[in-house]
């Protein structure tokens, strides 16, 4: 089925947040929360189609500092390597905002759309945002699905060194569209799912679409800074009441399997699905399995 997306932008916490939705108006709302540097278009269309086929009203949006949503620059510099080192030692870091602010954005979007309760699905940083929101506002959350995410505790295993190097933005900066696409596809290949390979053509096409829609490296840096500045939110997770599904790849080089396992351990009644050969990407061939797990978890609400 081809989805018909309605789109808009709403004022939330002094920012404009861009959103799209598809599916039946009477369907249970399901909010997709994207990860670091991602845009709403990074949620694969086939994945959204499967969720709509399950009867959900699917809402996806751009986080602040991404896509067509507002900049959130408060003038604080971003020093990702230094902030990463501080975070590993549990030291505070300055930031323009943190993950709690992103959770407030998600809640504000639901309010603006007139949605009292929703299923939450988050990937990577988006999974952290969803965990925080489910803990702080349990009455607003029908179910929680956290994919390739973490509790953000500094003692959890670190990412592979070559991935950290890329994430820190070290090395020569891309200056043209072609260079940006080449760098993005190389990064996706580095963190991707060896058991569920994504064709180069798909990765390059998506990187080009993302560049043409909104290329915002400063926003990506501020989002990374927000993750580092937030630190561990493990004490909150005992407050999660929604049925929870944690999905994590055993081949994830960025957020190691222990990161997802820790969330599942701390959230009461959480289900944990560890997938052999899954890395840290939204591999199209994984989407049917993800959609099935999410729908199964939502049925427990």
Image (cartoon, grey):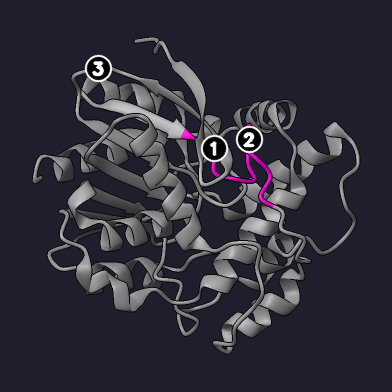
**Residue shown at the point (51%, 47%) measured from the top left:** 13
Q: Give residue 81's mark.
A: none
Residue 142 versus residue 209 in the image, above or below: below
Above or below, comparing residue 156 to residue 284 in the picture? below
Q: How far separated are the C-alphas under marks 2 and 1? A: 5 Å
* Majority secondary structure in the magenta region: loop
Q: Which of marks 2 and 3 is nearer the N terminus?
A: 3
Residue on which disc 3 sits: 25
SS assignment at label 3: loop
Observer-nearest of 94 and 143 = 94
Q: Do the residues labelled 2 and 1 touch (CB within 8 Å)?
A: yes
> In the rendered image, which residue does mark 1 sit on?
62
In the rendered view, does 127 fall on the left or right side of 240? right
Numbered badge on residue 67? 2
Kind of element beneath mark 1: loop
* Residue 120 inside the magenta-drawn segment: no
Q: Quadrant of residue 6?
A: top left
What residue sits 24% from the left and 20% below the top?
Answer: 53
Give the residues drawn in magenta, as a range.
61-72
């Amino acid at each position: 089925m081809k989805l018909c997306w309605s789109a808009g932008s709403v004022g939330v916490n002094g920012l404009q947040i861009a959103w799209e939705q598809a599916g039946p108006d009477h369907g249970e709302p399901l909010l997709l929360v994207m990860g670091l540097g991602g845009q709403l278009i990074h949620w694969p269309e086939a994945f959204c189609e499967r969720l709509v086929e399950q009867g959900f009203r699917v809402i996806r949006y751009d986080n602040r500092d991404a896509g067509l949503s507002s900049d959130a620059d408060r003038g604080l510099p971003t020093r990702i390597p230094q902030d990463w080192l501080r975070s590993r030692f549990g030291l505070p870091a300055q930031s323009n905002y943190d993950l709690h602010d992103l959770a407030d954005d998600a809640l504000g979007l639901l309010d603006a759309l007139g949605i009292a309760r929703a299923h939450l699905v988050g990937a990577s940083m988006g999974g952290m945002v969803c965990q925080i929101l489910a803990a702080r506002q349990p009455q607003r959350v029908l179910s929680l699905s956290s994919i390739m995410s973490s509790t953000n505790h500094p003692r959890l295993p670190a990412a592979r060194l070559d991935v950290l190097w890329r994430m820190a933005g070290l090395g020569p900066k891309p200056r043209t569209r072609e260079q940006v696409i080449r760098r993005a596809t190389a990064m996706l290949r580095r963190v991707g799912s060896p058991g569920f390979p994504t064709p180069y053509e798909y990765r390059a096409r998506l990187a080009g679409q993302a560049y043409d829609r909104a290329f915002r490296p400063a926003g990506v840096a501020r989002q990374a800074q927000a993750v580092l500045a937030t630190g561990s939110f493990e004490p909150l997770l005992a407050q999660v009441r929604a049925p929870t599904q944690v999905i994590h790849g055993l081949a994830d080089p960025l957020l190691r399997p222990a990161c997802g396992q820790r969330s599942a351990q701390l959230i009461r009644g959480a289900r944990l699905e560890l997938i052999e050969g899954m890395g840290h990407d939204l591999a199209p061939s994984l989407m049917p399995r993800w959609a099935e797990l999410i729908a199964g978890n939502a049925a427990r609400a």
